[in-house]
Image (cartoon, rainbow, N blue to C red):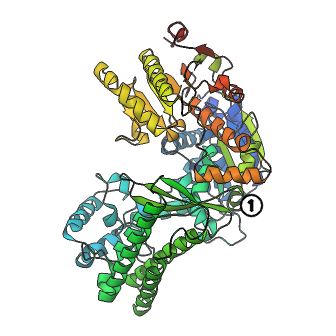
Amino acid sequence: MIGLNDEAGPPTETGPKPTRLREWAGEIFAEGGQLCGALALEHRPEQERMARAVAAALQADEPLLFEAGTGVGKSLAYLVPGIIHAVDQSRQLVVSTHTISLQEQIEQKDLPICRRLFKSDPALAAYADFRSAVLVGKSNYLCPTRLGHALADRTSLFADADYEELQRIAAWAETTDTGLRHDLKPPPRPEVWDAVNADSSSCSRKHCDANKCHYQRARARLRSAQVIIVNHALLFALINAGGARAQGAEPDARGVLFPDDFLVLDEAHTVPEVATSNFGLALSSYGVDRALKYLFNPRTKRGLLRKHGGAAGQQLVLDALEASRHFFDFLATRLLQPRAVVRVREPGAAEPTLDGPLGALHRLLAKLADQTGEGRDHDELLEQKQRIKGLQAGLTEWLTLGDKGHVYWAERGGRKQTIVTLRSAPIDVAPELRRHLFGCRTSVVCTSATLAIGGSIEPFAVRCGADHAQAEAVKSPFDFERHMRVLVATDVPLPTPQEARLALDALTDYIRFCTERVRGGSLVLFTSYTDMRAVAQELEPGWRQAGRPFLLQGAELSRTELAQQMRKLGNAVLFGTDSFWTGVDVPGAALSQVIITRLPFDPPTHPITEARCEHIRDQGGNPFNELTLPDALVKFRQGVGRLIRNKTDRGLVTILDSRVLAKAYGKEFLGSLPTSAYERMDRGNRERVFRPFP
C-alpha cells in the first residue's frame, strides 16, 4: 500500500492541495508497486522513468519532450500521474492523439486499467471516480432543436428528395444514443446534415434542452470531465479558433484548450505537420458553393433567404454563385491546368470578382438580422453573415498573399479533380506553437516513439518552438536483435527518371518474391500512389487466383477498416502510402513483414517544402540536412516500428531502396533501425538469404 495521504490526498471541497505527485508516480510504477502487485503487470524500468518525468513536469507546470520506444507503455505512464494531478488540482487533463486507433485504445483499454489500479488500494480509491470524455467537433453531432425547425421549415429549406433524407435522419434520431454522424449508415448527405447538425448558434444552451440535445449533453460531460481525449486536427483547429480564451479564460490565464488545463500530445512526431495545416487557410470552391446554396439553392428553390430575403436576396446569391464559378474556373484553367498543386508567389493570381457579390450578401444578411427580433432566426442570420464575411476575408488574404510568414498555393482535388482549394500555411510553425502551446504557462508533454533524430530530440524541439523544454528518451524493452531481421536489396535500380521503369519492375518482382515466402501478413509501404497502383495492378490477379487476401489503400475501406481487416485475415498483403507509415497497429503474425519500397523523402516540389527550403537557405542553412533528411528519418522509423508491437512479435523488415547502401546519408537510416544487424540480398542470393521466421 502506498502512503498517498502523507502530505495530501484526493481533492476535498477546499480545492487543490499540494502533492508529492512525482514520488507517488514512482511508487506506483516501481517494481513491486501497484501496477505489478495489484494488476500483475510486468515492471518496466523505462515506464517508471517516464512516469516520474511526466509527474515532475505536471507538478512544475513545465513542458516535457519524452521519446519512449515501442512497448514502454507510455499511455499509462502519462495517464496515471495525469489523472491524479487533474483530480487533486481540480484541473483538466487533455490527451491528444493523431490516430483514431490510439484514441480508441486510451478510451477502451487504458482508462479502464487506470480505474482498476485506483480501486486496488484504499489510498488510491478516490481517484477511481475520475470522469472522462471524448471531444468531437460540433458538426459531427445531431441537434434535435435544429432538426425540429428543419422539419417545420421544410417547404422553404428542402426539395422533395432532400426532405426524404431529412425524414431518414429524423427516424434515426429516435433511436441513436450518441447523435454522432458516423453512427448513421449510410452517411447523411452533407447539404441536409448542414441544416441539422450542432455547428450553429441555434444549438446552444439558450435554445436547446441539455437533456435532449446530443451536443449539449456532450458539452456537459466535457465540463465535468477530468480527462478529455481529442485528436490533433481538432485540437489545433480549436486552438486556432481561440483555444482557452474562447472557452472563457482570462487573456493571461494558463491553459491551452480550456481554462487551467494541461496537455499530453501522444504521437507527437506529427504535431508540426498537423499544426502547419491548421494554422493556415483552406478555402475551397466546394465550401463556397455549399455556403451560398445554404442561403438559396437555385436547383431546389430552397434556402434561408427564401424565407427572409425575397427575390432580391435570392438574386444576390445567384450573382455570387455565378461569380464563384467564374473565379474558380479561371484558377483551374489558368493556374492548375498543368499541375494539381501550384504555388502562388505574387499577389493578384486572379481578379477579386467574388469580393463584390460576397460583400453585397454580407450587407443584406446584416440588414435582415437587424430587422429580425431576438430569437433563432436572428441568430441564424448573424451566423451566416459571419460565415460570408469569413469567406470574403479568406479570399482577400489569398489574393493579396496577406501574411508574409505564410506560403500560398492552389490545388485541385476531389474524386474528379474538379474542386479548387486555396491554401496557405506558416513557413515556420515554431512561433505559432510557442505562442499557442508552449507559451500558455501550463504543462505540455509531447511523447512518441520517434522524436529523436540521430539520438537527439533537439531538432524536434526547435521545430516545435519548445527549445527550452526538458527532453528525455528511453529505448524499447523489446528484443529486436532476436525478433527482427532486416534485409536490404542491393540490385533495385535507383529511382531516377531514366531508371523509373526498371525500378518499378524490380519492385514488383521483389514484392512478389517476399510476400510469397512469408506466411503471415505483409505491409508494403510506398511513397507514391502511382507506383503503388502500378504494382497492385501487376500483382493483384495472381494473389486473387491463389486465394491470398489483398488490401489496397484508397480502394473502398478507410485506414482503420483496412487495419481491422488485416488483423482479422491473418495473412493479408496491404499496400499503403503516406498515412500508413505511422499509427497502424497490427500485432502478431497478421503482420510478419514490413516492406519499405522507397526511403520516405517528401517531394521537394510541394509549396510548403519548397518555401521551407528557401527559408533555411536564406538563414544560411542546408535544407537537405535540416529538413528533408530529418523528416524522412522520422517517417522511416515509424514505418519500421509497425512490425514489432509486443514482446512476442517477430518478423522481417525488407528495404528495397539501395540508397541506404549507395548514398552517404544511408548510414543515418541504417543507424536508426532498432537492431544493428542487416543482411544484403540480390536476385542471385535471395533464395538463400531471405529466411522468414517459422
Find residue 498 and report its image quarter: top right
Using the image, determine if residue 343 lies above or below residue 77.
below
In this rendered view, identify the residue nearer to me: 178 or 328: 328
Q: Badge 1, how many Cα within 10 Å: few under 14, some, many 20+?
A: some
In this rendered view, identify the residue nearer to me: 536 or 386: 536
Q: Which residue is mark 1?
A: 441
**Residue at the spot 37% in from the left edge and 80% down from the top edge:** 319
77 left or right, relative to 143: right
- Residue 581 location (% of width, % of height): 54, 36
Q: Quadrant of the N terminus?
A: top right
- Residue 487 location (% of width, % of height): 58, 18
607 left or right, relative to 146: right
Using the image, determine if residue 627 lies above or below residue 259.
above
In this rendered view, identify the residue nearer to me: 390 or 541: 541
**Residue at the spot 68% in from the left edge and 57% down from the top edge:** 433
Q: Could you tell me which secondary element the residue under label 1 belongs to?
A: loop
- Residue 408 location (% of width, % of height): 59, 61
